Image: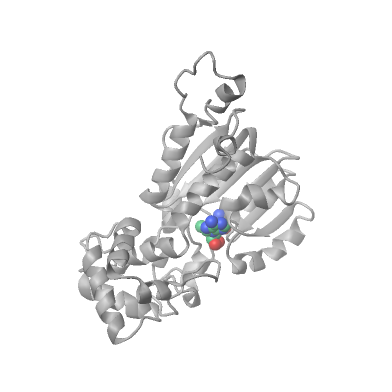
Amino acid sequence: MNSTAATSPSSDTPHIPVLLTEVVAALKPRDGGTYVDGTFGAGGYTTALLEAAQCNVWAIDRDPDALARGSALVSRFPGRLHLIAGRFGDMAELLGERGVRNVDGIALDIGVSSMQIDDRARGFSFLRDGPLDMRMERAGRSAADIVNTLPEKDLAEIILTFGEEKHARRVAKAIVAARQERPFSRTLHLADVIRSEVRRAHDGIDPATRTFQALRIYVNDELAELDRGLRSAEFLLRPGGRLAVVSFHSLEDRIVKTFLRTRSAEAARPSRHMPASAIKASSPTFKLISKRPVLPTDDEINRNPRSRSARMRVAERTDATALAAVAGSRA
Ligand SMILES: C[S@@+](CC[C@H](N)C(=O)[O-])C[C@H]1O[C@@H](n2cnc3c(N)ncnc32)[C@H](O)[C@@H]1O
């Protein structure tokens, strides 16, 4: 979910799944098939998959609140929906522990849900006052811990890298000065300090947007998680299985695009002395379904403005050995 769109004040609506028809069409659920929804959220993708075929869905979310809300769905699809608390970066292990070694399709819908953004107590919003938290898992270091303790140089680096904020150094300096007066504990305190340093741009985007996005990504280690999720999907998908990833900003999309491009590229012609197993391992593990990302239609954007920055990439698993498995670790 794009953090700009996700914090509009009129956003107290339930989470509307983004590119839902497109995700289901990409995964082509079939009766008896097994699918993973790595970002369960409000269960939009999960429900659509379970309605489209007599299939099984393993739905993962790192947010305990999302899973608690999902228990009603489990009874609606008896024996077909399994909820797992955890991270999609660990999905191969999470499913392996439950006896599932491969699956027919995986959907990832990266970012935060409307429920997370709209609940001021979760501390993701720069428009509603709440504790400066931002932890999807409700564990680990909060955003307040980060802004109150990290050296100015590190804060600037985070704000620049994950927020693409060109005034990152100035914002970091202001944060460090303000915390000496009073440590941060509330979202609006931080938003006010940022707004006092960075002027609102012509496009009307709130100056706090980029710094809040940066902190959220850092607190939840989101980009590393995405990378791990892609590798885990490569390991778990059976030949012909599909991966559909919906992302909301360029940092995420770049990771997905680069991974799929690399994994779908033919390796240099191997030596004729190379053992057959190694040749197979160096073959493409994915086939791109389309080179260009799938975008929401104008109609979807009108119905759900939060979808406007979404893009979906889809790839199909080949029968080549997963590179992560071949290397014995992160390839
Ligand atoms: C955009 S929402 C998904 C909405 C969902 N597709 C739907 O239709 O309701 C993203 C969800 O993924 C979860 N999430 C984000 N990163 C995750 C990760 N690495 N592992 C598991 N869940 C994650 C968030 O907690 C949030 O509930």
Q: Residue furthest right?
A: 79
Residue drawn 51% across and 38% down?
314
Pick the front one: 51 or 228: 228
Residue drawn 73% across and 60% down?
74
Toward which corner of the image does residue 256 lie, by quadrant?
top left
Q: Quadrant of the N terminus?
A: bottom left
Asked whether residue 20 is in view, the answer is no
- Residue 270 in percent (x, y) is at 49, 18
Q: Measured along the vertical axis of the image, is residue 38 above or below residue 14?
A: above
Q: Quadrant of ligand 1?
A: bottom right
Residue drawn 52% across and 52% down?
109
Q: Measured along the vertical axis of the image, is residue 96 above or below residue 219?
A: above
Q: Is residue 258 left or right of residue 63?
A: left
- Residue 154 in percent (x, y) is at 32, 64
- Residue 316 in percent (x, y) is at 56, 33
How many dots with numbers? 0
